[in-house]
Image (tube, rainbow, N blue to C red):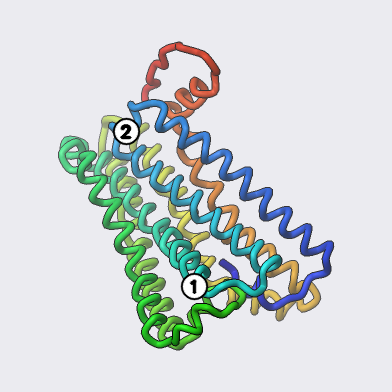
Amino acid sequence: MNSSELNKRKDFFGEAVFKNFIVVLFGIIINCINSLLVYTFFKNPVFAQEPRYILYMQLIINDMVTLSFTVTLFVLSYTLPGFNVAVCCIIILIGSIVYRNTPLNLAGMAIERFVAVCYPLHHSRICTIQNIKILICIIWLVGALPGVVDLLVLLITRPLSFFTSSRVCLPHNVFDFEYYVISKTVFNAGYMCLVWVLLFYTYFKVLFSAKAAASEPAQAQKARKTILLHGVQLLLCTLSLFTTFLDGALTTLFPFYQSVIFFCNFIFTSILPRLLSPLIYGMRDQKFKKYMKSSLMCGSDKRVIDPSD
């Protein structure tokens, strides 16, 4: 979350109400769209047998939790400037875990598409349901590790009275020690670089495989576009790590629009990226779209015929 948006300005009442309204409205709309996708997935067991849809649903649910916590923290920064530190630690811990899960999940989805296109004969053996579940567990473990370590350091270095006090519920207000800044920078830089390398590698391997292969060029082209969209998502995730620098650079150029710049950066890097996930499969994938339309038909018992991928 863009902490500078929440901490460096004092808005007029009308401006504060408008910003909270926009953030909550975006959050409700995006989560409603995502809820429809989750409903479609669980209503139709056919998706639970395909690894790419399992990974996609993991991304959707993760995005819903991330967005919910982002919106909650934004609203709390206005309505409850003094928030219990112990409860805030739990909120920040969960928020940081699901935030870190997103790039890792994008990498996993790109690898699955890479195997499907470049090694189609081995796809069913490598990308089994069991292996996908193990991959999801690894994603959650890697995403949770830095947050758990930060919380343990906080528990060791702070007295009990600190956790019963009240503060603005933002990471830099609670984890106010140098280790947190260093560890967050090192870990985020390291795993973002790793994910970018994986995305570039899978994209170009799929690209070259599509040119070399005479069969299923449409599947390769679709996989390449999907990975490219994952790259756009990852770019927005990466930008969210540099909101402080973006805020500083833009406010230097436009000092009279500081509040607007902070808010727009927050919307662009923390809210709107969650809208890309339903667009990638929910709107582009013909099979998922077919079942989604069927799920919306109340009382319909019509059998859905799988469109060709």
Q: Residue flagged by tag 1: what amino acid is it?
A: Ala
Residue 117 x, y percent position in the rendering: 27, 39
Q: Residue at x 59, y 69 (%)?
A: 2
The answer to which image quadrant residue 209 occupies is top left
Q: How many marks?
A: 2
Does 253 sit left or right of 143 as displayed? Answer: right
Residue 191 x, y percent position in the rendering: 35, 67
- Quadrant containing the N terminus is bottom right
Residue 238 x, y percent position in the rendering: 48, 65
Q: Residue at x 59, y 64 (%)?
A: 73
Q: Nearer the viewer, residue 195 or 131?
A: 131
Does 160 sit left or right of 206 as displayed? Answer: right
The residue under label 2 is 48
Query: Closer to the observer: label 2 or label 1?
Result: 1
The residue under label 1 is 86
Does 84 sit left or right of 100 as displayed? Answer: right
Residue 271 x, y percent position in the rendering: 59, 55
Which badge, 2 or 1, is on the more N-terminal residue? 2
